[in-house]
Amino acid sequence: MHDDLETLASHLNTRALGRAHEHHAEVTSTNDRLAQWAKEGAPDGAVVTADVQTQGRGRRGRVWSSQGENLYVSVLLRPGRLVDGSALARDFSALGLVVAVGLARGLEPLLGRDCLELKWPNDLLVGGRKLGGILCESRWLGRAPEVVVGFGINVRQEEFDAEHVAMATSLARLGVEEGRPQVLARVLGGLESAVDAFVARGFARLRGEYEARCPMLRGRVRVDAGQGGVEVQALGVDRDGALRVREEDGQERRVCVGDVVRARVGSG
Ligand code: BTN
């Protein structure tokens, strides 16, 4: 199989995403390299990929193991000035959820409907195991955000170390044989469609799609961030991406950051 990410351009079906592309054999983090390129004038939609990241990072300061034959990708988004009162300004913090919808749109044709699940805020799971994760990092130029959307998707890695073997999966393990450039082209297409809709109309139309792909929003969950691991009923997501939950006392609360897992059946 031809798996060279330098060939990305020949697979692309996008307007902007990936049209400017740098591939590296090794970087510290694709997010860092793209942030640097952005300061030097990289265009909207520019993409950095790498075969290996020596300091790949995940949400909440975690390490993102980055040695396998997987996708390590960063995409530059410059959605424009956030004008007061606009849908985009109001919903901007839902961007990470929009990215998850976009990646799901791209991967779904490979995996079949209902196979891929989202886990709030923006993990990609299959059969309860992690297939991919998203890390968005922004800087502000006045009222205009410049967002580095980083994501990792396990593509061809079949073996995982002891720490990850029970928690991780890959497209290869799921029987998908497409190589990294083809998978990335699909994902960038899905991402562009979701981001375009978000920039034009905010999160309103995408929220239902996010909730439909996120089964944990229809059950009891355990919230670990700042709430002492309480078990609550998930209700859905707000327009700004916050998770809405109902606590035991009937009070509704919003969770803006943190780790949330499905409650074990029979617990609580
Ligand atoms: C998470 O699930 O915690 C998010 C993982 C994000 C990993 C990707 S790989 C490409 C980009 N570069 C990084 O250093 N991190 C993101």
Image: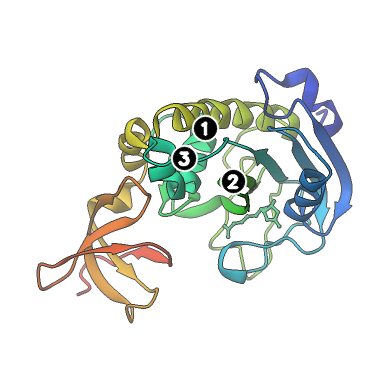
- Mark 1, Cα crowd under 10 Å, few <14 / some 14-19 / many 20+, is many
Q: Residue 246: x percent and y percent? A: 18, 63
Say if 44 sits above or below 229 in the image. Answer: above
Q: Residue 61: x percent and y percent? A: 62, 70
Tag 3 residue? 98
**Residue at position x 31%, y 69% in the image:** 222
Tag 2 residue? 145
- Mark 3, Cα crowd under 10 Å, few <14 / some 14-19 / many 20+, is many
Is residue 29 among what the camera can see? yes
How far separated are the C-alphas under marks 1 and 3?
Answer: 7 Å
Image position of 54 (left or right of 57): right
Tag 1 residue? 195
Say whether disc 2 or disc 1 marks the residue closer to the N-terminus.
Answer: 2
Split into quadrants, the picture shows ligand 1 in the one at: bottom right
**Residue at position x 82%, y 45% in the image:** 37
- Mark 2, Cα crowd under 10 Å, few <14 / some 14-19 / many 20+, is some
- Quadrant in the picture for the C terminus: bottom left
